[in-house]
Image: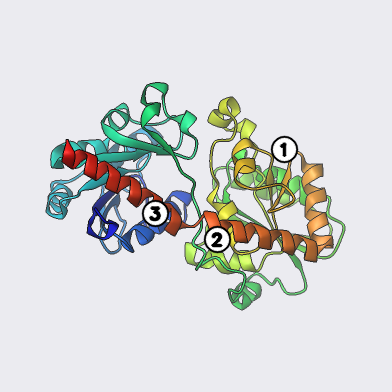
Amino acid sequence: MTGSSLRVLVVATNIDVPGTHGGSTHVGELMAALSESAQTMLLARRGSHGPGVHGVGLWPRTPPFGLRHALSTVVSARSLAAVRRFAPQVIYERASSYGTGALLGLATGAPSVCMVLDEHHSPLSLHYASRIIATDTTLVPARYRHKAVQVSWGANVERFRPDVDTSAVRRRFALDGRRVVTYAGSFRNWHGVDVLLDAVARHRGAPLTVLLVGDGPERAALQARAATIGGDVKLLFTGAQPYDDMPAILAASDVFVAPFVPERHPLSARRGFVLDPLKLFESLAAEVPTISVRARNIEALFTDGEHLSLTPSGDAAALAAAIDRMLDTPEVARAMARRGAEKVRREHTWRAHAQHLLRLFAEVRSASAAA
């Protein structure tokens, strides 16, 4: 069965589409790439919108955490009727949908494929899934690992490019005449923004602006720490920015930093860093010199010194040295970033990811039809 004749229902009931979270980026880009070769429908969090998108759940956000996730999976009679009209041939359930995809598969007779991001997964989804995809197959419980398929995420290389117009961003944040170091993501302790602040506090070179793009529970503490940093270092907390603005923000940057501290993440502290950060694919696609941390999954994707620079997690002195090295030798840093961009364009695009999934979906559909 060809991709163009395949009807794929994507179930991501806890994700806002569009949105500013990494999950929103993943789902939005995946849908765009799948839609190039297949007919698609998306069940996302209530309030989501777009072609083929149906919002489900009782509330967009309802604390506490567990209740919020549970209520996001509630599929209304209207949404179920829309699914039946669509008549999916394959259902792809994203992590955190807690069995909704599996139940819809039972209701429609369509085989399901589920994606696992961490240890929070539904036994129902794992049991009924024909295949289970993960960026690290050790995340899949051993009894289901025979169904596991390893994948990697990617970037929209048509969107994230080095030649994006940055004039509006430079005016908005008063970047002219200053070197720019950027962080983008959540302000949670395992993202290591405090380590970045400690690193830039050591800067004694040219005027530096640090763009801190995002939001999260650590923001107030980070802002208090930033207020103590003197010298010619300006720290700007921009808040979460629309996805459409991120290519220009990255392209305006001299250095991008993803200073994770995996030891602070409950899962990564036990298993090693098992997440594939979208931000690395995007910053490299934009040919921005990039610094992250030495971690098994990152080192499996990119080579230290060839594509990006890796420092020990939590080591502010090493991070400061890496930032200064890139700022002091921009030609060397940009050449490294170009090699990283070539690797992303060659191996880690959303289009390539979607084509991998479509081949898998076609196999699952054929096996189901033959059963």
Describe residue 116's horizontal placement relative to residue 200 as left or right.
Answer: left
- Label 2 sits on residue: 345
- Residue at disc 3, secondary structure: helix
Residue 13, horizontal then vertical, whole percent = 31, 45
Q: Name the image quarter holding residue 40.
A: bottom left
Q: Amino acid at mark 3?
A: Ala
Q: Residue at x 67, y 63 (%)?
A: 338
Structural crowding at the residue carrying mark 2, measured as other residues with C-alpha within 10 Å and reported as few (<14), some (14–19) or many (≥20): many
Instruction: Please provide percent x and percent y for residue 273.
Output: 59, 35
As measured in the structure, the alpha-carbon distance from the residue carrying label 3 to the one carrying label 2 is 14 Å
* 261 vs 39: above or below: above
Q: Quadrant of the C terminus?
A: top left
Q: Which comes sooner in the sequence, label 3 or label 2?
A: 2
282 relative to 248, above or below: above
The residue wearing badge 1 is 314
Q: Are marks 3 and 2 in contact (CB under 8 Å)?
A: no
From the viewer's perspective, is the residue at label 2 or at label 1 nearer? 2
The type of residue carrying mark 1 is Gly
Of the numbered discs 2 and 1, the one sitting upstream in the chain is: 1
